[in-house]
Amino acid sequence: MSVQDDIRQTAGQLLADGKVDLVIGFAEGTLAMKAAPCFITAADDVEQLVWNSFCLNNLAVYLSRCFTPDPQLREPPPPPKVAVIVKGCDGRSVVGLIKEQQAPRENLTIIAVPCDGMLDADVARRVLGAEEIVAADEVDGAVKITDETGKETTVDRKELLAEACRFCTHRAAAVYDQTIGELPADADPLAPDDQFEAYCQKPTADKWRQFCSEISKCVLCKACRSACPNCYCRTCFADQTRPNWMGSGAKLGDVIFYHLGRLFHQAGRCVDCGACVRACPVGVDLRTFTYKLVEDAEQLFDFTPGLDLEQAPPLTVFAPGDSENFITDPE
Amino acid sequence: MPQETNNDWTPKIVAFLCNWCSYAGADLAGVSRMQYAPNVRIIRVPCSGRVSPMHILSALHRGADGVLVSGCHPGDCHYISGNLVARRKFSMLKTFLEHVGVEPERVQFSWVSASEGARFASLMEKVVQDIIRIGPARMPAGVVD
Ligand code: SF4
Ligand code: SF4
């Protein structure tokens, strides 16, 4: 049975048995190379579910919303039982949300599916130099892409991988209730991250220049925040008026503040899923900055988010021997 | 904060000092009449663990040239472990700020106990000299209300 059929059958069964109220998965999207997140509540609708190489979004982003009671309701209904289809990155985000008490473990059915890396329409446009992708069809690792002029090109799927997927090392969820198909083992990244390494080697002044020039592209639409499963605060500091952390964004300083604040809130939490990067309409390179937090959590505290339900988030605990080398000693 | 012309620029430094150790250390430096650079604006906080990275970022966003956070030495925290949790946050914040291109001297962390008035004075001298050396903040100020 194909993974897609298996997903449909599993989802249908869970809904028919009343084990879950909602299945979060992917349906056919309206654009080529983009599957759309979908919410299935009736066993009859499971035919909408698809599984292909275009299921990019991090579905964990919807979970905290499922468990946030409507403040208008005097008697909120009991929290729903939710099944969610997860790739490696989604699964790691789900673990983070459980630990941060945004989703009760007992109400979740985590369905882990294999992921070979997802393909990104923006990457395809860049590779082909095309304006628009109107159709894409994958057969055995070769993707036939039709662009807006009707020209067909066949490209190896490796060339179309989303940025985050090229560097992914945890391809399967570590915590799950059910699996579908054969889960892939942890793997080395497909390519070394030269761009990040090159950035890290730059002198501080150049880093600041590059950071500012990236951030100055930002139009403060906050789509990066909406796409990130970790950004679940009901009132973000960026929208708060008391205290008024930042202005509306008319000044570059405010945009920088938004990003420093949002980025640093990902410290020890970011799973490097790339959802924020792909959500950005103007192509701000956020990964160069989020990845630093991933790397530091690992190097300083030996912590990789989303792999273990028991391990405490690194910034909520301490160890007597934590690094002190950044402390200023006047003597 | 108004921007002065470059020749008469003096650094503005925000210092978050914990109530139980570093603030008392600053107080001791004062009552002992020790001399130190007058560029610091002290904000008293209950514990270095109270200082959110957002406070530090906000100080920079609002035009500070430098930020210092100081708490009790590890093991001496009035709340037992507030400074130890803070230490983790600060070590990540410091490397992260360096990663985006903020000079390492711009944001500094230290431990000063209530009996260390002299240490506080020399710490302030050091921080002020560091900031004078690297010059005014590169961070463009945002909207300040
Ligand atoms: S910050 Fe970006 S890469 Fe990190 S978890 Fe959020 S959406 Fe994913
Ligand atoms: S998605 Fe892009 S443009 Fe929108 S706020 Fe985030 S970085 Fe800025």
Image (spheres, rainbow, N blue to C red):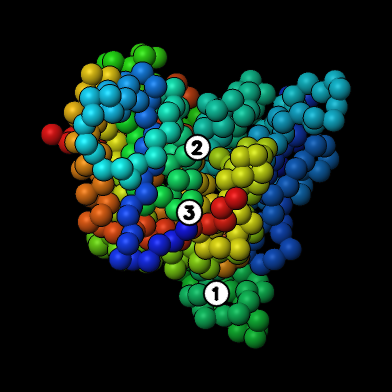
Count residues near mark 1 (Cα–Cα under 10 Å), then give few for <14, some for 14-19, many for 20+: some
Image position of A90 (left or right of A195)? right
Nearer mark to the viewer, of 3 and 1: 3
Count residues near mark 3 (Cα–Cα under 10 Å), then give few for <14, some for 14-19, many for 20+: few
Image position of B2 (left or right of A53)? left
Quadrant housing the C terminus of chain A: top left
Say if B92 sits above or below B82 in the image.
below
Dot 3 lies on which element?
A: loop
Which residue type does callout 3 highlight?
A: Met
Q: Which of A2 and A28 is in front in this view?
A: A28
Which residue type does callout 2 highlight?
A: Arg
Label 3, on which residue?
B1
**Label annotation for residue A92:** 2
Does residue B74 appear in the picture of this structure?
no
Residue B36 location (% of width, % of height): 24, 39
Residue A139 location (% of width, % of height): 55, 64
User: Of callouts 1 and 2, which one flags the residue occurring earlier in the amino acid sequence?
Assistant: 2
Label 1, on which residue?
A125
Q: Distance between the residues labelled 3 and 1?
A: 46 Å
Q: In which quarter of the image is residue B95?
A: top left
Give the chain letter at badge 2. A
Residue at 22% across / 56% down in the picture? Answer: B133
Say if A143 sits above or below A150 in the image.
above
Residue A11 location (% of width, % of height): 71, 36
Dot 2 lies on which element?
A: helix
Give the chain letter at badge 3. B
Dot 1 lies on which element?
A: helix
Which residue type does callout 1 highlight?
A: Arg
